[in-house]
Amino acid sequence: MAVIFGTMHVVKRAGLENPEYALYLRTAYAVATALMISFTFYLKSMIQRKNDTTALEYNDPAPGSQGAPRIETTVCRYDLAEVAKLQKSSMFTIAIVAFMHFKFGYIQPLILQTLLPMLNLYKHQLFQIHILGKPAVDGLKRPWVPENPFAALTGGAATTTAVTAADVGSDAAASSVNSSAASTPEPTAAKSKSKKETRKDK
């Protein structure tokens, strides 16, 4: 978010929204987009050359996928699928930016999408593992949970937490014990009350 607001501030201060800069901005966007797409194919070739056949088995970590069948694949196939997602996302973004620019004359999307895709690619797990050589542990451990773009706005976390059957069972057991304890009368208090009533009758 800081990058977006900072970029828009610079655009307004520098007057880059002026139509006379449109050609230069289109060229910059085209070059940045071409680099982004080329880099995804480079990543794809690196993954294919490594051909990591390590078995990978997991439940779909995407939000709202509870009860999904367990997925069995390899590290190579998983990473290739992630590259395909990157490429599809890039194609969709190109279509949206082109429509907004040529249909409505918006300049801002050209500028933002010249900078953001490369920044997002740098932060992507594929780049961190295959280009920077970082080990696939902690936040880079597969499978990768899709980020929630509204997490920062709502105060929520970008990742989801799995609840195991043991957790549910222990919570249910604790709830049962608490409810039974609350509903069971104390025998000592009952006996004391009975003695007092007997004395009053006498």
Image (cartoon, grey):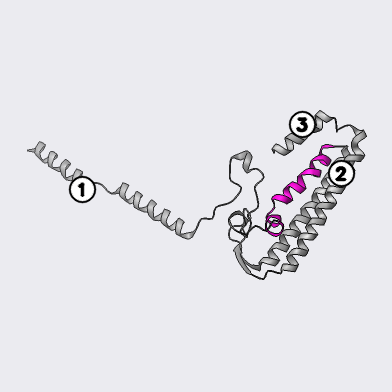
Q: Position of residue 187 (x, y in %)?
A: 20, 48
Q: Position of residue 164 (x, y in %)?
A: 49, 58
Judge from the rendering whether residue 178 lies leftward or rightward of residue 67; answer left or right. left
On the image, numbered disc 1 is attached to which residue? 187
Asked which secondary structure carries label 2, the reply is: helix
User: How many angstroms separate mark 2 from mark 1 (CA)?
Assistant: 82 Å
Label 3 packing within 10 angstroms: few (<14), some (14-19), many (20+) = few
Residue 106 is tagged as none
Which region shows up in magenta? Answer: 106-131
Q: Amino acid at mark 3?
A: His
- Give the number of the mark in front: 2 or 1: 2
Of residue 115 and residue 84, the one placed in the foreground of this image is 115
Q: Position of residue 104 (x, y in %)?
A: 87, 38
Within the magenta stretch, is there residue 107?
yes
Decide which of tag 1 and tag 3 comes sooner along the chain. 3
User: How many angstroms separate mark 1 from mark 3 (CA)?
Assistant: 73 Å
Asked which secondary structure carries label 1, the reply is: helix
- The quarter of the picture where residue 16 lies is top right
On the image, numbered disc 2 is attached to which residue? 28
Decide which of tag 2 and tag 1 comes sooner along the chain. 2
Label 2 packing within 10 angstroms: few (<14), some (14-19), many (20+) = some
- The quarter of the picture where residue 82 lies is bottom right
Asked which secondary structure carries label 3, the reply is: helix
On the image, numbered disc 3 is attached to which residue? 9
Give the residue displayed 62% in from the left and 43% down from the top: 151
Give the residue displayed 70% in from the left and 66% down from the top: 77
Q: Do callouts 1 and 3 mark residues in contact (Cβ within 8 Å)?
A: no
Q: Do callouts 3 and 2 mark residues in contact (Cβ within 8 Å)?
A: no
